[in-house]
Image (spheres, helix red, strand yellow):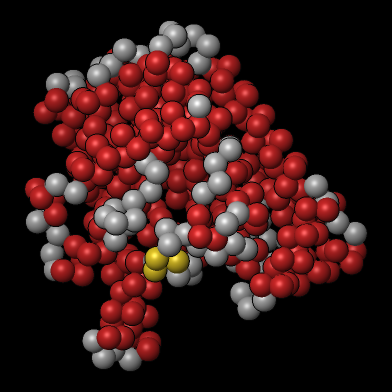
Amino acid sequence: MKRSLESELAKRSDRVYGYIRSDRYQKRFFPEDVHDSVYLYLSGRQGKALRPAVMLFSCGAVGGDEEIAIPAAAAIEVFHTWTLVHDDIIDQDDRRRGGYAVHEEFRRRAVDRGYGDWDAVRYGTAIAILAGDVQQGWAVSMISELAERGVDLDVVLHLIRLVATDVTLTLLAGQALDVQYSKAPIESLDEDLIIEMMRRKTGALYEFAGKAGAMIGLNTKDEENELVHSISQFTGRCGTAFQLQDDILGVTGNAEKLGKPVGSDIREGKRTLIMYHALTNADEAQKRYLYGVLGNESASNEEVCEAVDIIRKLGSIEHTEALADRYVTEAREYIRNVPESRYKDLLLMWASYMIRRDF
């Protein structure tokens, strides 16, 4: 099943990235550093394109032609990419997908050009901010291309409004909460607050992917349409489960597969559900140790590994895995009313894949 789904994901990824890399887009981006920064994560180190794939699966599941939805699928991948570029600046992560993050790549290029250390940092950060800005605008404009493929103009305008306002504001609120929570006393938080932050930060874009795919497939802007509502709820809940799995991989994963250092969430002081569970169930000695490592950017690999061992012993990883499983189980109930088809099977396989992946 996994191999079959990965084959289907790869097909969609190739189509979406082929669209993104077409010359008609590439020639627009100037100067060279803007072009290269915009394409750094979109050429050569492309992701799995999970969001575009689920948009295309959702379109097919309601009887639509997924080829019509390709511009929107490409748009959601570019939209997701700008959030990664800016997220790397916020978290001061220097690695992404096995290479340098945009801000770090262009800091290094600035050093090679003779910039001083501080000026190089400023230049790298400036280019990364600009790259994200370009990608955000580009993503919104791509959605307009649906009209060229026969999608009703009212539907196209509704999708643009959704992604430019509702989705963006929800996602940025989640990101802001994530930053705020990293400095908040653990006693001021609870599981519901953390889950809601994750829903905003990650689940909202997956919800939009399902909703947009169904709307395009049905050529409707009616968000209350039974199939649109069901699929968007399904993909949104799976998106939250995806973030739970991401947090698990952040402490247990393989750095080579993840493309970034394991333990970075701990060093950054992230109040993940795993860390919340651990700190609320730890004894005094364990709490002291965890607090000594949490948010300590200079913590050694050995100290991080010891923190992970404590987290394991407290059952925090198993607790988070169980919650991710529950979200996916609940999500499946939402698409019982979706007609049986190959696309529905792909959606169900995708749901399981979201919490079984190791990257």
Determine whether 7 is above or below 80 in the image. above
| Residue 97 falls in image quadrant | bottom left
Nearest the eye: 224 or 329: 329
Q: Is residue 317 among the parts visible in the rendering?
A: yes
Nearest the eye: 167 or 257: 257
> Going by the picture, which residue comes out furthest to the front?
3
Residue 329 picture location, percent across and down: 63, 24
Q: Is residue 149 left or right of residue 115?
A: left
Nearest the eye: 253 or 85: 253
Determine whether 75 is above or below 277 in the image. above
Q: Is residue 200 left or right of residue 114?
A: right
Q: Is residue 166 among the parts visible in the rendering?
A: no
Q: Residue at the location (21% across, 43% down)?
A: 18
Q: Residue at the location (50% across, 32% down)?
A: 2
Residue 121 picture location, percent across and down: 37, 80
Q: Residue at the location (89% across, 67% down)?
A: 285
Residue 276 picture location, percent across and down: 73, 52
